Amino acid sequence: MALIEVKDLSYTYPQAEQPAIKNINLEINQGEFILLTGPSGCGKTTFCRTLNGLIPKFYNGEMTGKVIVNGLDTADHSTMELAQHVGLIFQNPDNQIFALTVEKDIAFGLENLGKSKPEMYKEIDWAAEVTGIQELRHRATHELSGGQKQRLTIASVLAMHPKIIVMDEPTSFLDPVGAEHIFDVLNQLNQELGITIIIIEHRIDIAAKYVDRIIVFDRGEVRSDGSPEEILSNEDTRLLGVGIPRILTLAKRLKDEAIFDNNPLTVDHFYDKICTVIQPASNKNIKPPFDLDELSGEYHHKPLIEISDLYFDYPGNVTALQGVNLTIHEGDYVAIMGENGAGKTTLVKHFNGLLRPKSGNIRFMGEDIKDKSVAQLARKIGLVFQNPDDQLFEETVEKEISFALHNFGIKESLIEKRVNWALNLLDIGKYREKSPFALSGGERKRVALASVLAWDPDVLVLDEPTIGQDYGQKERLRHFLMQLRTQGKTVVIVTHDVEFVAESQPHIVLMADGNVVTEGSTKQIMTTTEALARCSVAQPEITRLFTRLADYGLPNDVVDVDEAYDLLNRKIREARK
Amino acid sequence: MSLLESLRFTRGDTVIHNLDPRVKFLMTLVFFSVSVMFMDIVPLLLVFVVQIPLVFLAKVTNEWFKSIKGAGFIASFIFVTNMISFYYFRSGALTWDLVEYSLALTMRFIVLVTSFSLFFITTSPDKLSLALEKARIPYEFNFAFITAIRFVPVLADEAQTIMDAQRSRGLELDKGNFLTRIKNYIPILLPLIINSIRRSLELAEAMESRAFGATENRTNLYELKMNNIDVMVLVVSVILLVLAVYAKLYLPPFPSLLGNGPVF
């Protein structure tokens, strides 16, 4: 018998008109590692909540069909009972850590079950060991980093010995290196302990190489279900807006060359295959006949934001920035990258005066900003924060967007024009009279963006704009940023998303330990491996492939699929001639 | 505020940190009663002399000093108002016993601050909650207490982020008259409240998923057990209290240090 059996499952949230999931039939076996994906709002999270009975017991609403987990019908058993079979881990680690110390939090579930003290210590030892947080046992939970918190949530659930662990976007707050670490832990649980893992994730490039089955949801239904190779190379999946790993996209574009009998998901796999076709070249790393970047140099307009020797400490002498020097020019598109805690957000908060330097100075359009108020600076430099819920508060979307315009004292007649313009630009005109809280996460993010764009700042700074966004939403954002640039706006993004960067090719500023390590074009930065490693930034898949192909007479600074395709296609044809 | 902040728990592994919270609380109460019982500077100085080695033993001199500094304003206020009011009460004669008396009242305040800061700086909320549990407070209240403490830093971070986000949208908090200023805080309070409601739902979900309330006989990873040191401290504290009461009731008043001659 299957470990999880789902029969004709449909569920409607209370007060909702449409079912969130419908007609779901699935069987999941012991030891599977499953990725659930699909566009935002497709019902994946709802489905996970049915697995430990939160739906329908906690949420009420209307559920039909059956969910049987480890032989228990979820309709007949309480969540606290099911919790021993299914460990559910939610997106935000902060909202599921209850205790003040690591050890005590791991014990929380065991205490609830009434385990004895020696038993608890045994389980804590084991769970902390497996998740690699042994040395953090006595630390205070609020002092942990994002990745450590996420590992703690896994340990806490693991201590109850569930057969199944379900995780909802566990890596969305982590940098790529931290994300890989979480996947390594999950992989180990799956391989060594045979725990069934079900995971929701938008970062398919990372997830694809670990999982052995992908289930795609769309509008509350299961759209497709199969092996990663099968599902990801299916055209239907791509059209749904699921992010296909770039290496697979490249392989598919080369399909006419009949190199791949099955679809490669990893760089290694691709490399092994392609090497059987193309020949090594004696002249390593030849450059293409001409390189526009190199002929012209990077062209810069006049400096807009000039930062020199910027030092900043948080209260309690926590050093955050140590001597940052950086110039952003008019019309630039800049990405600030680096690991969590490198000082990226701290730096951009200096742009509009939210934080003031301990020493050093910042000039905007040639003027020192020391004596300017945040409101004065914000008029020119718009900052969009990561989480829209930290700023939305008005009754309607329209009021939300005009809030800042009133603050800046813009004329009433102009306000209406600006609001209409922003609503249209972000395609949210139809929500004008709706409450921002009634919208989905992606839509709320667009409202927050519109509420800043509406006053038409010269510089737009976006903090982690791609977090929690599905592939389709990211593509829309990318096009939108390109559009802003053609209007001459200066755009700065703070991001971990290497693939987003590889596709939009900004000027990159790499940061580590409160300082700028290096900066340059996407191509330059993505090939300086030491600096990338120091800043915990992973190379894009395509660049990793071309770094390995250095002996084949191909340039190594290739970042996007189009260029990679052209080069490889030419190379293959040459080899076959 | 700095006074309250300086009372925050500081992790440590010292005799004082490891005392049973009930015993430590009793000790604090003894300090409290003794300093309230006496108005003479000698016994108050004696209490202070007992407290100082405890502060050093707990290795929290910096934190303690911060709390004394935080209390400094109130302490000098006590001294000055006492001096002035007695001066006028005694129709303008400034004598040394007045100075001594005002000093004693100030000393009393410092002793009280020291005893409570020593308790709060060295007692983890976890241990406090255990003590509450032993006092048969229902677990739900206890859980609420710990959760409240757990989310103080989270909420503080969130409030800061919301404030930054709204200021970036041109909100000026300190603009306008009193009423407008209050109104200015609405864009900060609303997201904070809504996020908290959302958070409480998520917390409830996560609690369910960790088998909260699965059994009546909930266990606790940590347990309170009195060891020899605890018993010793308990006994010494009680003896001190008895001695103080005896001294107050049966012994002649403590000698004055400064005499009662005129200051000038």
Image (cartoon, coloured by chain):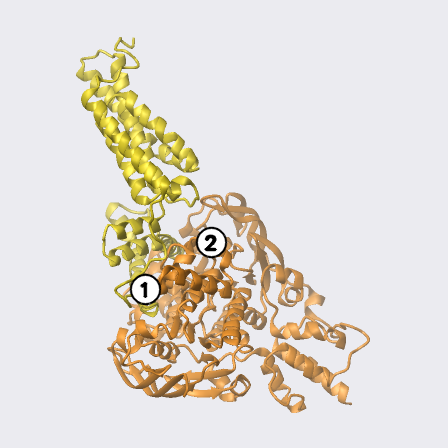
Residue A316, given in percent of the width and then of the height, sits at 45, 44
Residue shown at 66% from the left, 91% from the top: A258
Disc 1 marks a residue whose amino acid type is Gly
- Total count of labels: 2
In the picture, residue B15 is in which quadrant? top left
Image-based side of A94 in relation to B242, left or right: right
The reply to whether callout 1 and callout 2 are in contact (CB within 8 Å) is no
Residue shown at 36% from the left, 78% from the top: A51
Q: CA distance from mark 1 to mark 2?
A: 47 Å
Quick one: which chain is yellow?
B
Image quadrant in which the C terminus of chain B is located: top left
Task: Check disc 2 and report its element: helix, strand or loop.
Answer: helix
Q: Nearer the viewer, residue B51 or A98?
A: B51
Residue bearing the label numbered 2: A349
| Label 1, residues with CA under 10 Å away: few <14, some 14-19, many ≥20 | some
Can residue A65 be seen here? The reply is yes
Residue bearing the label numbered 1: A114
Residue B26, given in percent of the width and then of the height, sits at 27, 39
| Label 2, residues with CA under 10 Å away: few <14, some 14-19, many ≥20 | some
